[in-house]
Amino acid sequence: MDSYKLLITGGIPLMGETYVSGGKNTSVAVIPATLLSDEPCTIENLPDIEDVRVLKDILTDLGAKVDYLPESKRMTVDPRNVHSWLVPYRQSQRMRASYYMLGALLGRFGQAEVGYPGGCSIGARPVDQHLKAFRAMGAEVEERGAVITAKGKMHGTPVYFDRITVGGTINAMLAAAKAEGNTVLYNAAREPHVVDLANFLNSMGCRVRGAGTDVIRIMGAPYLHGSTYTVIPDQIETGTLMIAAAATRGDVVIRGCIPAHMEALTAKLLEMGVAVSDMDDAIRVRTVRGHRAVNIKTQEYPGFPTDLQQPMSALLTRASGDSIVIETIFESRFKHLNEMQRMGARVRILDQTAIIEGVSELYGAPVTATDLRAGAALVIAGLMANGTTEIYEPGFIERGYEHIEEKLRALGANIRREPLEAQEMRF
């Protein structure tokens, strides 16, 4: 349990300018990919988040030399002395994206042993499509309790995903990067971080074509040289800041982002009556009238992202009218709404659908973050609420948002940490 709680006194419009950190979802794919290089690599614009620190520990345990200073936002990885293909269960449990070590180690050694991944509890996130891809490329794969083992020389082949899978697409790209021949991924994911991984692999000498479409072609290369690469801005942090600005009826300019990645969210905010304007690498969000209810259905990119469903549904609790939110990606991503009912939200949940009746006010209350994006949603709810909201288990938020408290305070938010008292340790 975390040793502190977040206290937010709401009702203050966010005003001013802020910036977006490097992408979490890109970073957790690109860092494992450095294991495929035959020379040192440097990754820049990394966010200072827990998942990056966990990956540093994993690479170090495998034998890589890792130089990383969070304040520099830069990590240099020399993988030439990597001697192990085993990621212990205790390490893999610290984050969900530890499963990318399977593809990276298979690509490097033709062998991998990785404990089942941990991370946020938002429902079943099966890895069957990942393992299907590995088997198609020549690996023998076993699932033994809490451990996945894979072994075999990778060779190019067509891979047909039964459903769109971001993690499976990335893992297959990693395993194929040094495979003999050409690998073609059909029904591939199109997310921006899939494209960014492809660009990084290309910068090392691999040949990846079609990233950003549903067919990706990878021509493996036996030798991959070192590279210095800058990861893209975080799409989900951008969206969370946009939603926070709208929720507080503020006026915020978010710099260092990619507006084209935000089109699904921008469309919904405009539908609600929020003013959104784009610049080359910035977005301005301001509220000029009351918010209207809207309906949302999560979909794979370029549809509405599941990672923004929770922050967006927090905003909808105060929109005028009834909103319907349909979650199609994960089955346990409405836990935050149960917490927000303590704050006065009116919500009915029917399987994968939430019906949100907008209310005029939310009220500060003690609530608990159950996962990363749920934590962000509760922060937004706290920023909107009258009185003070206490958020327990805020460590989830640190997994994916760099210094979010400082960024919000710079925009005027009243948000601070407070140590837990003895009786709260049992909350």
Image (tube, rainbow, N blue to C red):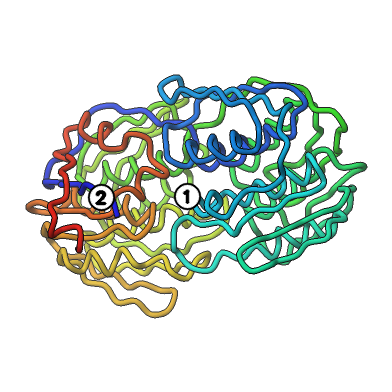
The mark total stands at: 2
- Residue at x 13% of width, y 55% of height: 422
Task: Using the numbered discs, state the Cα–Cα distance from disc 1 to disc 2 in whole angstroms.
Answer: 19 Å
The crowding category of the residue bearing disc 1, from other C-alpha atoms within 10 Å (few below 14, some 14 to 19, many at least 20), is some
In which quarter of the view is residue 14 placed?
top left
Extreme residue toward the left, this view: 387
Amino acid carrying label 2: it is Ile
Amino acid carrying label 1: it is Ala
Residue 160 falls left or right of residue 426: right
- Residue at x 36% of width, y 28% of height: 19
Upstream in sequence: badge 1 or badge 2: 1
According to the picture, the residue beneath numbered tag 1 turns out to be: 264
Extreme residue toward the bottom, this view: 350
Residue 184, image x, y percentages: 83, 49
Q: Which mark is residue 380?
A: 2
Q: Quadrant of the C terminus?
A: bottom left
Residue 18 falls left or right of residue 53: left
